[in-house]
Image: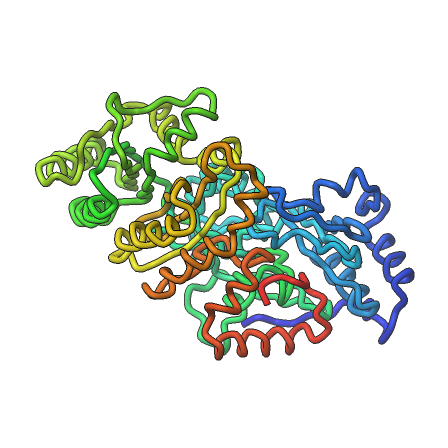
């Protein structure tokens, strides 16, 4: 059961802003804060460059107790707080607003592994741990932490949990929420919610962990978490396949899951339009196949068995049957780890390839897997009614129904002109998503980018309930204001 703790340094009923900032400076010490414009700049702009904000200071606490004391001081002075991890948000969730009233609370100094329990298959980490470092620590203990994102070298686990990050392995292991067993968090009044449990069964009331995961820092600040570990894979095989259509890709997935004993770890769909952008803009990339095709799938099988050779034989058998059934047109199976990494380099550089190509409007959506092919074509028909020349760069995690349905500007069209059509494009895509029972945000969250869309598409009763929870936990509205709702 989660327990609440209050710091000894309880805040006064009221505190001036100047006094609160001075207190925060004392809490973190001279190296734990800055108000230098140059030092703050990386914390005030999002990765895509869509949002630029201002802040009173950037604060870098070293412990949960520091966070608690900082939040208490801010609550007493009504200073807004923007929690920030690696600042890799794609929806502006970790960028302060332009009014400059908030502080940015950067969690990067809180990067300790507190515990690793191999028998319980858990690792307890602080919010500022890089995702890649957690993966490495698990492997060193002969265990596996499967959350995997293109930004894993810079994103932090606190942000991953706060946005309920997905990634390429969601098909087999689930989103970040499904990989956590317990969390520690600081609530908007400064109290510490201690729920760092490694239990897989605990039915003692409301699940407060699930409430805070995915809340994007609007209900509290996640400071640590207990994460699930899995047996370390002993074999992993990758195949880069050309498929005749997205519908064929969905059928290939069903076939591969059945024939492999559900050993499919990742199943990524890419159209030729996207592959061309990556090949054109990312050095040291190459087309795995000799002939051009319209659609591709990158598929990974994984095994924890010590029986050598089984997985390679399984991959070959899956593809042989798929060729016969017309689900695969051509394929290359990675013959080495270097070749497997080369395949994945194509997928992991999709966002960077699009960025270098020019302006694009991004949609992180999900529909039932069975509806994904119909959605792909239907939504593009609606988009083309707005601009027949727009380029569709729709790709993603077919196995969990999540497409990054991105629209690339026609060649020669400047960003201002293209982005002027954003609202029309968004409604065209999201209306089809809603008709098909999908979600307008599959894994990137809401942040600042999709607040209006959420208000339009979310069930009204669900929105009212969300606002009631926000008002109950954060009545002053100080936690990551302007995000989500």
- Residue 223 seen: yes
Residue at the image point whose x is 45% and y is 37% from the top: 410
Q: Is residue 312 above or below residue 453?
A: above
Residue at the image point whose x is 42% and y is 30% from the top: 277
Is residue 262 toward the left or the right of residue 342 in the image? left
Picture coordinates of residue 479 (x, y %)?
A: 68, 64
- Residue 196 seen: no
Residue at the image point whose x is 50% and y is 32% from the top: 412
- Report the number of discs: 0
Is residue 286 toward the left or the right of residue 318 in the image? right
Picture coordinates of residue 213 (x, y %)?
A: 53, 62
Q: Is residue 203 above or below residue 99?
A: below
Q: Residue furthest left?
A: 324
The residue nearer to you, when weighing 105 against 437, is 437
Is residue 384 toward the left or the right of residue 130 in the image? left
Picture coordinates of residue 399 (x, y %)?
A: 30, 50
Q: What quarter of the picture does the C terminus occupy?
A: bottom right
Residue at the image point whose x is 74% and y is 41% from the top: 41
Is residue 291 toward the left or the right of residue 30 in the image? left
Q: What quarter of the picture does the N terminus occupy?
A: bottom right
Picture coordinates of residue 217 (x, y %)?
A: 62, 61
The residue nearer to you, when weighing 472 against 172, is 472
The residue nearer to you, when weighing 418 against 104, is 418
User: Which image quarter: residue 265?
Assistant: top left
């Amino acid at each position: 059961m989660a327990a609440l703790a209050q710091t000894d340094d309880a805040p006064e009923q009221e505190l001036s802003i100047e006094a609160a900032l001075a207190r925060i400076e004392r809490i973190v010490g001279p190296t734990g804060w800055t108000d230098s414009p140059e030092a703050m700049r990386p914390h005030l702009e999002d990765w895509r460059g869509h949002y630029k904000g201002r802040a009173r200071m950037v604060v870098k606490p070293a412990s949960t107790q520091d966070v608690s004391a900082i939040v208490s001081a801010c609550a007493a002075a009504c200073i807004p707080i923007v929690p920030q991890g690696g600042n890799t948000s794609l929806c502006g969730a970790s960028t302060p607003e332009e009014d400059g009233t908030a502080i940015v609370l950067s969690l990067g100094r809180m990067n300790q592994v507190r515990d690793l329990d191999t028998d319980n298959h858990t690792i307890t980490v602080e919010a500022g741990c890089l995702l890649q470092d957690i993966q490495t620590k698990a492997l060193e203990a002969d265990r596996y932490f499967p959350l995997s994102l293109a930004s894993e070298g810079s994103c932090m686990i606190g942000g991953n949990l706060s946005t309920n990050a997905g990634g390429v392995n969601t098909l087999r292991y689930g989103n970040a929420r499904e990989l956590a067993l317990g969390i520690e968090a600081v609530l908007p009044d400064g109290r510490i919610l201690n729920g760092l449990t490694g239990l897989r069964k605990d039915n003692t009331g409301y699940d407060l962990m699930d409430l805070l995961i995915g809340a994007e820092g609007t209900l509290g600040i996640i400071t640590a978490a207990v994460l699930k570990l899995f047996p370390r894979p002993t074999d992993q095989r990758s195949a880069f396949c050309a498929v005749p259509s997205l519908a064929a890709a969905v059928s290939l997935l069903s076939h591969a899951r059945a024939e492999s004993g559900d050993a499919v770890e990742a199943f990524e769909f890419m159209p030729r339009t996207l592959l061309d952008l990556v090949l054109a803009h990312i050095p040291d990339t190459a087309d795995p196949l000799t002939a051009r095709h319209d659609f591709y799938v990158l598929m990974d099988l994984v095994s924890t068995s010590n029986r050598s050779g089984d997985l390679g034989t399984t991959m070959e058998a899956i593809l042989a049957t798929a060729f016969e059934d017309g689900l695969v047109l051509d394929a290359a199976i990675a013959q080495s780890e270097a070749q497997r990494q080369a395949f994945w380099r194509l997928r992991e550089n999709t966002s960077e390839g699009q960025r270098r190509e020019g302006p694009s409007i991004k949609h992180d959506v999900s529909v039932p897997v069975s509806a994904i092919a119909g959605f792909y074509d239907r939504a593009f028909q609606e988009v083309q009614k707005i601009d027949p020349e727009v380029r569709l760069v729709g790709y993603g995690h077919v196995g969990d129904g999540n497409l990054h349905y991105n629209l690339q500007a026609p060649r020669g069209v400047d960003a201002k002109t293209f982005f002027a059509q954003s609202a029309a494009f968004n409604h065209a895509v999201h209306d089809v998503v809603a008709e098909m029972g999908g979600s307008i945000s599959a894994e990137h969250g809401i942040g600042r980018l999709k607040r209006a869309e959420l208000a339009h598409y979310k069930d009204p009763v669900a929105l009212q309930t969300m606002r009631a929870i926000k008002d109950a936990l954060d009545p002053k509205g100080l936690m990551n204001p302007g995000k989500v709702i």
